Image (spheres, helix red, strand yellow):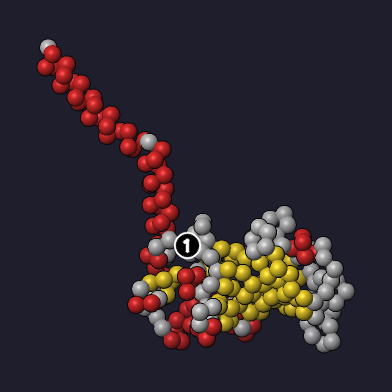
Amino acid sequence: MRIIFLGIFLVCIFFVGCLIPKYSPQFSRTVGQITKSASRDPAAIRRVYDFSQLDGSALDQASKQRLISGAKIRKDAEEIGIELGHFVLKGMNGQKTFACQKYSHIVLQFEGDGSASNGEKPTMEVEGSCEISTADVNSISPLWIPVAKILGEPVADGEFDFRDGHPIKVRFANVFQEWPAEWRLRGIKLINQEDPSKEVSIVDKEIRQFMDHPFIVNFK
């Protein structure tokens, strides 16, 4: 009988030992870390957004089309976010890399409605970090424009450097009497600060080419 009870006891110990790592808090954190790390692997992006086999004009065209085709407007109570499409390209040593790992900054250029100043239309330039979306590697994290804060400031040309919440720089030129209510996207730049000559630059004509309607940000 002692031998039978000893055998049952050892079997129970074995199963308990297998279950403890599976349900322990430490194990859960480890799994979360592995999953999060895997999601930042360029291989996790959709195959159609993997441009690592392209170069030259083919890469330039595909990159521009992807940035624009993935453009979306996000809104909350006080801010408006501009999200762009993300992609993978060939990095150093031929390895795949995310666009936001090669290009550190994004600049969005807008033209405002309303009266022109000295014959020039109002312009707004938004600059922020290029970061992979935490929700979806196929998208670039939105650049958040703090609209409520801007509308609370006197109307004037110049630069706002917002560091609270989502760090962002917003530059205005040719504004007159009141802040324009609508801003049309007319330019996008991805900037490589280590080598500015390698930037991706999309002009107004190309945005019109890739979009079947104007991309409008409404402040009011």
User: Who is closer to the viewer here, 78 or 70?
Assistant: 78
Q: Secondary structure at mark 1?
A: loop
Foreground residue among 169 and 122? 169
> Which residue: 60% across, 64% down?
142
User: Residue 119's x, y, as percent?
Assistant: 82, 87
Q: Is residue 9 left or right of residue 217?
A: left
Location of the C terminus by quadrant is bottom right
Q: Answer with left or right where residue 27 lies relative to residue 167.
A: left
Residue 63 in picture, x, y percent from top left: 49, 77
**Residue type highlighted by circle 1:** Val
Q: Is 81 on the left or on the right of 160, as rendered?
A: left
At 58% across and 68% down in the image, what residue appears?
129
Displayed quadrant of residue 205: bottom right
Picture quadrant where residue 125 is located:
bottom right
Which is more toward the observer, 110 or 159?
Answer: 159
Quadrant of the image occupied by residue 208 = bottom right
Q: Quadrant of the N terminus?
A: top left
Does the rendering let one see residue 72? no
Tell me what residue is drawn at x 58 percent, y 78 percent: 189
Residue 121's x, y, as percent? 78, 82
Q: Which residue is mark 1?
A: 137
x then y, percent, for residue 158: 77, 76
Note whether residue 97 is visible: yes
